[in-house]
Image: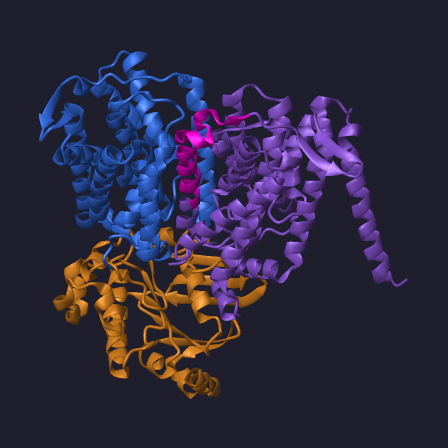
Amino acid sequence: MTNVTRTRYGRVLVWIISIVVGFFFPQILGGTEVIYTTAALVAIFAIMSYGNDLILSDLGEVSLGQTVFWAAGAYTTALLVIKSDWAPFMSLAAALVVSTLIALALGLATIRTRDFIFSLVTYAAAIIASAIVTNTAYFGGSDGLVGMPLLSIPVVGGQYEASSNEALWPIAYVSLVLVIAFVARFRRSSLGITSLMTHMNSDLAETMGVDVRRTRILVFTLSAPVSALAGWLYAYQRSYVSPDLLSQFFLLLMLTAVILPGKRILLGPLFGTAVLVFQQQHASFGGDIDRLVLGGVLALVLLTSSDGLAGWWRAITKRRRTKSVTAFNSKDSNGTVAASLPTIKE
Amino acid sequence: MSLLAQIVNGIALGAGYALLAVGWSVLLGSARLVNFAHGQLYMLGAFITWWGTSALGLPYFVAIPLAVAGAAILGMMMQLLMTRLTLRQDLVSLMLVTLAFGYIFTGGASLIFGGDPQQIPSPGMEHRFIVFGAHLAYQDLVIIFCALGLYAATWWVLTKTNMGRIVRGVAEDPKLAQLYGISPAKVYIGVFVFAAASAALAGALIAPRSPILTSIGFEEVIITFLVVVIGGIGNILGGLIAGFGLGIFTALFGAYVSPAYSMAAAFAVLLVFLIVRPQGLKTS
Amino acid sequence: MTALLEVSDIRVRYGNSPAVQGVSLSVAAGELLAIAGANGAGKSTLVNAIAGWSRGPAHVEGTVTLSGRDISRLTAQERSRMGVALVPEARGVFGDMTLEENLLMVKAPQEGTGRTYEVEDIYGVFPQLRDRTHAQTSTLSGGERQMVAIGRALRAAPNLLILDEPSVGLAPRLVLEILHHIRELVEDGLAVLLVEQNVKAALEVCDRLSLLEQGRVIVTGTADEMRDDERTVHAYLGGLRS
């Protein structure tokens, strides 16, 4: 075997071991229902965040409406399963389709708009969606839809019923692994590369033949089913859906999960979600204080680091500090060439 | 109620929308900064006013400057914290930081002021009169006059004074403004404080119309966004027209179709606008 | 003459590529120092760094001293208030404002700077601008915009005026006219640092000329000395070609 194939086999081996260990992680930590609940929530919210990750880390846009896809996935599932008795995988397919269509509509509507207007439109979309859902009886109004049955999927030898979080865990975990693999594959694909090019310098990308608009819509549309998958899982996990799915909590959670570790780190959103969910479940001092913590963490990270924890790490390990004339000649600039995020183009 | 009465209602409603949006429009036009904490600053303006009248026993019109000052201080603190990012022109991070601050304000307000609905007692709400069939309160008149006054003052400052020139210069080219001896960072602080203070003023004046909760503010961001985009970013007169227009639209839609979906309908109109005429009412 | 401006070992790089690699120079009051060199020699980068300004992120090292005071750590706006006025490449005026607004906008200089210019004084230097006082600056011609840019620099009552390629895009006659105006200001005591690709025009008005090549000063001399220097001719031709 050559060195190259040896390292490739080695890498694959590491991944396989990690996946197996990850599966048994809740068991290793004690295996109680509480732990499995936390683990399931981490998996679900991480999947939700990965949808956001594609847009924020790769495309470089700030979509504040990812909760719409997440909620669309959950509500589509609940509506079809509770009212029309659809099977789980059929409702999943429907959830993916509905969220994709909504993303397509939003993306096409914002095709001519500048970056921050895109952020505002997506933000408004989530709030409007919340208003519509809360005021419409079909969606269950402010109480939402209750009475989700247990997730029951056909397997060899009968039905597998997720009657507890421990039983739901394998399904959630497999979904998480698939999503992470998808994101990894995406980043190696040509669309992943063009979206990164668009992120770094969209004008330059255009001169190199990249269809920026098409890239934006494709990535935006691709992110929707990822978050919708999480919504599908959550509908079953929580057994009810309600307008709170569109609230700021999930938005901030998604954003912080991606930003806290640092952008474009494959396992970053998983790590970020784990930290935040752990705080919510096991170190909470009440809803209001949780809000202060979540908002505070996001603000702190954004204000003090150019790229989350990874940015802190880089700043600490950096040796040379040269004086620099940055965008506005600030006196204590740290000499970095700010090429990581796009600015508004007139 | 007749069509004319609804239009009058819409004007009263629209004056509030316009008042809410003026600071955001100037901030967006000059600093290109989207302040997602805008709705929470509106909410804090309302709640500090309420707290002033209930806990401190101040008369309503004395509590208002207290709320405005409080929001101004919060705005200054926010902008000072964001200075490093502003100097780097990291607009994405700045947007997200304001979003985070908004969330912190929601949690903090709930902690301090509680989760129950409150009512701000304003003498302006106690007396009603009839205009073309519409029932207006004196509060509505105050809002209309304040909106017109603030817009006129803002327009005058921006076009006729040196301070306005400086703001416009920084809006056009902050780097170049340095060569004129101007510190863009200081201008951003000033504009941000104005935006925070005017949002709080809107909260203090508009909130007495209905009970308030610490969870409000999100619809206000959408309203502001609609007004500013339709009016044209940084376009003062356009914002005023768009505010009144949106108010009339909301009143009519609410009266003849459905009040619950009027925001959604307005949003749909916005999407059409964005496709057809992204620059809004601006002529240039 | 004691030097008004002393620049010591300026180094500027963009990311990892060096643009200016150790330049030292000085300019005295009432003196016009011209900086010439081919495109990409680092002239703009150098004078921008002296003014503490740049469009993009740049790493700057070295010392800049104005009237004996070290201003190396000051921001561009602070240096502007201390009497360093930069007219950058591409004019540097606000297009969305009228001519008069551009002149009025300049922040009043601090004590101890150069001769003060009221708006009326600017019209005295550039009479052509008087008729266009309420015109939108974006509608002015290139030459008029250049005059406005210089006018607004003067409004900051500078001790040191830095001009970056004022001749670009202007008819030769207009260029000489403007440069002669500048020369008059120099005779009045203003120190001027002039970046010019048009070496011929620069030689007509400068006291000394420095040639910059790949971020380094290769020779400095009086106008007479440089006129006959082979390298000046080379730079002139280099400027022509690009």
Residue A307 drawn in magenta: no
| Of the pair B155 and A234, the residue shown nearer to us | A234
Q: Which chain is purple?
A: A
Q: Main secondary structure of the magenta part?
A: helix
| Of the pair A41 and C216, the residue shown nearer to us | A41
Asked if residue A308 can be seen in this view, the reply is no
The magenta segment: A122-146
Residue A131 drawn in magenta: yes
Colour approach in the figure: by chain
Task: Judge whether B184 appears above or below B117 on screen.
Answer: below
Q: Position of residue C40 (x, y in %)?
A: 48, 74
Asked if residue C86 can be seen in this view, the reply is yes
Q: Quadrant of residue A228?
A: top right
Q: Which chain is blue?
A: B
Q: Which chain is orange?
A: C
Q: Position of residue A28 (x, y in %)?
A: 80, 29
Task: Judge whether A195 appears above or below C24 on screen.
Answer: above
Q: Quadrant of the C terminus of chain B?
A: bottom left
Q: Residue at x 37, y 22 (%)?
A: B213
| Of the pair C40 and B165, the residue shown nearer to us | B165
Q: Quadrant of residue B217?
A: top left
Q: Is residue A71 left or right of residue C135?
A: right
Q: Is residue B183 left or right of residue B138?
A: right
Q: Position of residue B184 (x, y in %)?
A: 36, 48
Q: Quadrant of the N terminus of chain B?
A: top left
Q: Which residue is the extreme one toward the right?
A: A1
Q: Is residue C121 left or right of residue A244?
A: left
Q: Position of residue B112 (x, y in %)?
A: 42, 18
